[in-house]
Each structure stands twice: as structure tokens, then as C-alpha cells.
Image: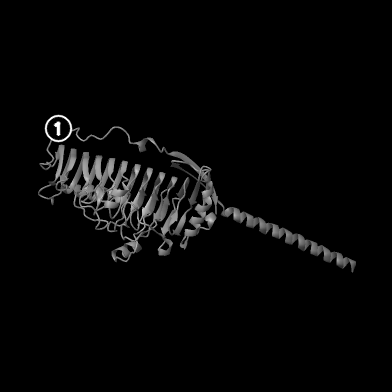
């Protein structure tokens, strides 16, 4: 019996040791499995400021399956990261995946970074788009007067904010909104993709923006802004899908962007009629360079039509427009007030255009019926030089306002090759004053030729605007662990 008992005890010990070993092995495998699911991602990019702290959206419950709403995950992450604003700032990393989300708001000293395979999908659930008041310089929503849906990525009263990535994508899934707009079913104005208000030191760069419900990038009442390396694509028939709209902004640089849209590729604005006049906040000191635009029904660069706060000191160069209605367009009307002046455009190439240049003082869309009919706009000092265009139906349509002519219009070293179906009169000019030098085809009589000796007319300013000497980009390097 004793021998049997000892044998039984040995068997129990062996079973215990085996079980313990098995548990240890399984625990080790599980730990290794967890380690295997932890990904370390390293990346670098250029930014106006680097961040001391970084976290991933997945740390806050983000699910990149294209179906699960991540609005709460974005809000939770940004709320958590706000504690680092005073400690050299924080960064939220969005890894590869499809991240469905409604509107969310950014914070100061913050970077939102999208992986090259990350796609933000704008939610089709209208309850995920809070409604806010109209912009004070517009007096009403752009589509509807009652208010406006908050933009997908939104921020107000911020400083030092960056939205960037390794060409990650933001898809506004705009067809839902375009249909509602065309059917006049919207109570509020459609949201934009990125809007920052009353903010300073802004960078929006290295992203692809698709199918915005309306405008794509809208800095407003802000200063010291860089928009760089942005690709914007929307169907050319989509309504009001403007590319980049600096609006009542100071010191802005837009460069190295490619835009295909249903409206103006860059639209410079500053408020609407009596509301813009009262708010009185101009857009000034703007640089636009290395822009490529395709927009068959709109312009590569437009000034207005909402320009009632004024637009001044704009430098645009190295612009390519392809199959675009007009190269540069100035839109205003009686009742706008304000001004567009000291505009310089050079080294522009245009291919297949309806108009190379278009100015109109009869763009009469008004915020309401309360505009001042005595508020006349001032259009002065508009300069174009070193420009070539081909396959153009009409060189220019330049229509000022009776008793309020557009003055200081200058064209130099401009060659426009007309299409075989071109208008018999390539230039249409009324209520304007200016000069030309070295322009083909021959301009209208209101733009007398000053002769080749004056080819330096309307020269581009040589001094830099402040935005070219500030906001230098630094090289930021990050390593982040996430599942």
C-alpha cells in the first residue's frame, strides 16, 4: 500500500509540474502574441513645430474598419492630449485604415498626422455634424441662412496647429451633401473639410482631399498660414467644391498644390456685402505659387465675389491652368464695397480656356436685400505679366462698373493663342483703365499699348512678403508604438 501511495504521489507531482509548465508556455505565447501585435512606427516630416508627446488613435478605441464611428475616439484622444499643450505640444497619429468620423475640433500646440494609408471618411450621419452660427462677416450661411454644419476638422481661437501626413486621405463623401443641396433640402450650410477660425500659426500640408461637401480648406480670420503639398479632387460638376479659400486672413502661403474641382481652385475672400464691410477684416499679404488647376466651370484663382472686407497685396506665380474656364477672375458687384488692389500675377501657363482673364462688376449674388446700393468696390492695381495661353476662346472679358471703373490694369509680355472657334473680338472691355506692353492678340482701346520699351510694366515686386521669412519648417522625427 505504501508503494502504491508513493507511486500515486509521484504521478500527481508530475501532473502538477506538467500543468505548471503548460501554463507558463501558454502565458509566454500569449505575451509573445501581444508583443507581435504591438507595432512600432517611425516617420519624419517637416513642420512649423515638433511635438514632445505622441499617441495613436487606436489608444483611444479607434477602429479603422470603415464602418465604426470614430468621432468619440477623436474627441477622447484630443481631449487627453490637451494636457500636453503647455509641454511642447502633442501629436495624434492616425494609422493605416479607414476611419469613419463626424466633425471634431482641434486644440492649440497640436499636430494631426495621417499615415499614407489612412483614410478619414466623413460620416453620413447628420447628427455627427453640430450646427454653429454663420460667420459674422457673411451674416448668414453660404447655402442657407439659418446656420452651418461644423467642418469635418474644425478649430477656433487656436495657435500652433498642424494638419499633415504622408499624403494620407480625407474623403468628405460629398455626394450625399451635393444631392441634398441640389434638392434644396438643406436647412444649414454644408460643412467644409478643414476650417480654422481666429487662429495663428497654421500648417496644412501633404494630404489628399476628396469629395468635399463644399469648400475644402478654409482658413478664416487667421494669420501666418502655410498650405503646402495638398492634392484636392472632386467631380468637376460638384457644387461649390472650392479648393483653398483664404478668407479675411493675413500672411498666407499656398504652394505646390494640385486641384481638380467643381469651383475655383483658389478663391480669395473677405466677407459678404454689408456684413463684410462692417466686420472690416481684409485678406492681405498672400503668396500663391506652383499651383496646378483643372476646373472647367470656374477659375484657377478668383478674387471674390465675397470681398467686402478688402483684398490687398497678393503675389501669384508659376500657375498652370488646364481646361479651366478662366485663369484669373475678379468677381464683385454694386453693394460689395471693399477693394481688390495690388495684385501681381506672373509666369502663368494656360491650356484650353474659355477666358484667359475675366473681371466683372456685375456678380450680383447678395447675402440679403439689405445691402447698400451706394457701396461701390474699388478694383485697382491688377498686374499680369509673362503669361502664355493656348486654345483660348476669348482673351479677356473685363467689365467694370459704370461710374466706378476698374483702374491700374496692366498686362505685359502676354501671348494668347486663340482656338479656331474663338470669338471675333478677343477682348471685351468696358469701364476699365490701364495699359499693355507686348500683348498678343492686340488688346482693346481702353488698354493702350505702351510699346516694347515698356515691357517692364507691371513688374512683380522684388521684396518678400512676411510669410516667406517666417514659419520655417523643421524636420520632425517620431517613433510611436501602437496595436
Q: Quadrant of the N terminus?
A: bottom right
**Residue 438 at x, y percent in the picture:** 15, 36
In the current view of this chain or complex, which residue is farthest to the right?
A: 2
The answer to whether residue 266 is seen in the rendering is no
Q: Secondary structure at mark 1?
A: helix
Indicate the colouring scheme: one colour
Query: Mark 1 sits on what residue?
Result: 452
Q: Which residue is nearer to you in this view: 42 or 22?
A: 42
Give the image quarter of residue 66: bottom left
Q: On the picture, is 158 further left or further right than 421?
A: right
**Residue 360 at x, y percent in the picture:** 19, 49
Q: Residues within 10 Å of mark 1 (few under 14, many from 20)?
A: some
* Residue in view at x 28 percent, y 44 percent: 311
**Residue 305 at x, y percent in the picture:** 25, 51
Q: Quadrant of the C terminus?
A: bottom right
Give the image quarter of residue 120: bottom left
**Residue 290 at x, y percent in the picture:** 31, 42
Q: Which residue is nearer to you in this view: 22 or 352?
A: 352
In the current view of this chain or complex, which residue is farthest to the bottom?
A: 1
In the current view of this chain or complex, which residue is farthest to the top?
A: 453
Q: Which residue is nearer to you in this view: 122 or 282?
A: 282
Q: On the picture, is 82 further left or further right than 350?
A: right
Q: How many marks?
A: 1
Q: On the picture, is 417 further left or further right than 239?
A: left
The answer to whether residue 69 is seen in the rendering is yes
Q: Is residue 149 above or below residue 266?
A: below
Amino acid at each position: 500500500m505504501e508503494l502504491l501511495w508513493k507511486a500515486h504521489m509521484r504521478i500527481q507531482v508530475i501532473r502538477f509540474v506538467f500543468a505548471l509548465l503548460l501554463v507558463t508556455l501558454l502565458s509566454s505565447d500569449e505575451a509573445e502574441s501581444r508583443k507581435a501585435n504591438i507595432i512600432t512606427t517611425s516617420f519624419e516630416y517637416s513642420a512649423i513645430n515638433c511635438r514632445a508627446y505622441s499617441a495613436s488613435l487606436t489608444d483611444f478605441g479607434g477602429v479603422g474598419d470603415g464602418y465604426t464611428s470614430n468621432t468619440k475616439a477623436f474627441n477622447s484622444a484630443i481631449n487627453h492630449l490637451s494636457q500636453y499643450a503647455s509641454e511642447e505640444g502633442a501629436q495624434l497619429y492616425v494609422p493605416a485604415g479607414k476611419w469613419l468620423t463626424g466633425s471634431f475640433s482641434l486644440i492649440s500646440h497640436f499636430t494631426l498626422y495621417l499615415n499614407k494609408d489612412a483614410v478619414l471618411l466623413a460620416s453620413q450621419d447628420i447628427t455627427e455634424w453640430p450646427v454653429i452660427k454663420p460667420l459674422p462677416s457673411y451674416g448668414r450661411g453660404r447655402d442657407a441662412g439659418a446656420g452651418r454644419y461644423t467642418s469635418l476638422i474644425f478649430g477656433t481661437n487656436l495657435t500652433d496647429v498642424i494638419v499633415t501626413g504622408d499624403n494620407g486621405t480625407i474623403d468628405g463623401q460629398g455626394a450625399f451633401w451635393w444631392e441634398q443641396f441640389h434638392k434644396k433640402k438643406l436647412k444649414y450650410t454644408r460643412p467644409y473639410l478643414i476650417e480654422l477660425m481666429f487662429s495663428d500659426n497654421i500648417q496644412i500640408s501633404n494630404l489628399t482631399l476628396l469629395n468635399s461637401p463644399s469648400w475644402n480648406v478654409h482658413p478664416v480670420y487667421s494669420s501666418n498660414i502655410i498650405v503646402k503639398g495638398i492634392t484636392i479632387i472632386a467631380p468637376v460638376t460638384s457644387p461649390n467644391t472650392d479648393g483653398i479659400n483664404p478668407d479675411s486672413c493675413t500672411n498666407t502661403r499656398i504652394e505646390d498644390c494640385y486641384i481638380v474641382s467643381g469651383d475655383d481652385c483658389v478663391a480669395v475672400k473677405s466677407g459678404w456685402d454689408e456684413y463684410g464691410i462692417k466686420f472690416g477684416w481684409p485678406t492681405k499679404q498672400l503668396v500663391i505659387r506652383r499651383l496646378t488647376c483643372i476646373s472647367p466651370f470656374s477659375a484657377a484663382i478668383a478674387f471674390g465675389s465675397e470681398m467686402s472686407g478688402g483684398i490687398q497685396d497678393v503675389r501669384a506665380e508659376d500657375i498652370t491652368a488646364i481646361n479651366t474656364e478662366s485663369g484669373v477672375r475678379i468677381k464683385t458687384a454694386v453693394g460689395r464695397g471693399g477693394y481688390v488692389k495690388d495684385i501681381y500675377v506672373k509666369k502663368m501657363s494656360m491650356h484650353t480656356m474659355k477666358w484667359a482673364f475675366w473681371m466683372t462688376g456685375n456678380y450680383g449674388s447678395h447675402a440679403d436685400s439689405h445691402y447698400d446700393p451706394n457701396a461701390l468696390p474699388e478694383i485697382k492695381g491688377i498686374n499680369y505679366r509673362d503669361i502664355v495661353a493656348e486654345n483660348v476662346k476669348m482673351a479677356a472679358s473685363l467689365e467694370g462698373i459704370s461710374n466706378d471703373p476698374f483702374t491700374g490694369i496692366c498686362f505685359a509680355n502676354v501671348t494668347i493663342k486663340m482656338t479656331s472657334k474663338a470669338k471675333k473680338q478677343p477682348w471685351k472691355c468696358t469701364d476699365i483703365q490701364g495699359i499693355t506692353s507686348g500683348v498678343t492678340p492686340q488688346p482693346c482701346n481702353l488698354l493702350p499699348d505702351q510699346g516694347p520699351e515698356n515691357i517692364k510694366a507691371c513688374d512683380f515686386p522684388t521684396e518678400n512678403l512676411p510669410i516667406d521669412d517666417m514659419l520655417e519648417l523643421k524636420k520632425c522625427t517620431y517613433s510611436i508604438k501602437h496595436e
